[in-house]
Every structure is written in structure tokens, then in C-alpha cells.
Image (cartoon, grey):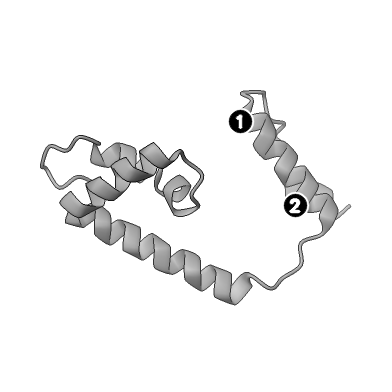
Amino acid sequence: MSCGEPHETDCSEVLDHLYEFLDREMPDSDCTKFETHFEECSPCLEKYGLEQAVKKLVKRCCGHDDVPSDLRAKVMGRIEMIRAGEAVPDQDVSASAQE
């Protein structure tokens, strides 16, 4: 998706990292770039607003469920493996947590 207009930060970069922005998991300088982009680009701003609304809805409807600690640990371990660039086993995390 792109509005067809040139921007300092490309629409594809913004959309590829939209959840990092929503979750504030990126440096402040990148957040500032994204905020500037949203001021200039209404299609990306619309997508941001939609994803923000979905995130709020999920939190409101599903945010009260307790996650088993062993499942949480396995998921966090997988995330760390991915961030470190390690190979991730093909085994389903949810299936192994129920065993």
C-alpha cells in the first residue's frame, strides 16, 4: 500500500513496522519518523488507526485471560531465538505447552 507520494520514510517501511510503532518497541527517533509520515500520508494514517482500534478491541475482549507460565516462557524463548537470528524448531508451541 502506498499513497503514491514521495515521503522521507517509505510507506512500505511504515507498514512493515507498524506493530513495533503501536507497541512502542522502536527507538524514539523512529517513532518521530513514523509520526511525521502519518501527518503526510492519509492511507497509512488510516491503516494505523484501524490497527490501533483492533489492538484496543483485542485487549479489551481478551486481555483478562491468564496465560500458563510455561507457555509464556516458551513463546518468549522463541521470540528471543528469532531476535538472535537462531533457527527456530518447527514444533508448535501451543501443542507442546498442553502436553
Residue 81 falls in which quadrant of the image? Answer: top right
CB atoms of marks 2 and 1 within 8 Å: no
Position in image of residue 40 (x %, y %): 16, 50
Residue that lies at the very extreme toward the right in this rendered image? 99
**Residue displayed at 44% across by 67% down:** 54
Q: Amino acid at mark 2?
A: Ser
Q: Amino acid at mark 1?
A: Arg
Compared across the picture, whether 58 is left or right of 71 comes to left
- Residue placed most toward the observer, 33 or 57: 33
**Residue displayed at 33% across by 63% down:** 49
**Marks 2 and 1: which is nearer the front?**
1
- Residue placed most toward the observer, 90 or 46: 46
Question: Is 92 situated above or below 54?
Answer: above
Residue 14 falls in which quadrant of the image? Answer: top left
Q: Return the disc, 2 or 1, that comes first in the chain's sequence.
A: 1
Mark 1 lies on residue: 83
Q: Is any part of residue 75 visible from this angle?
A: yes
Mark 2 lies on residue: 94
- Residue placed most toward the observer, 25 or 48: 25
**Residue displayed at 12% across by 37% down:** 6
Q: Is any part of residue 91 visible from this angle?
A: no
Please tell me the numbered disc located at residue 25.
none
Question: Is 90 situated above or below 86?
Answer: below
Question: Is 20 situated above or below 80?
Answer: below
Numbered disc 1: secondary structure? helix
Position in image of residue 16 (x %, y %): 38, 41
Residue 82 falls in which quadrant of the image? Answer: top right
**Residue displayed at 75% across by 52% down:** 94
Compared across the picture, whether 93 is left or right of 17 comes to right
Q: How would you rate the neighbour count of disc 2 (Cα within 10 Å): few for under 14, some for 14-19, many for 20 or more? A: few
Position in image of residue 45 (x %, y %): 26, 57
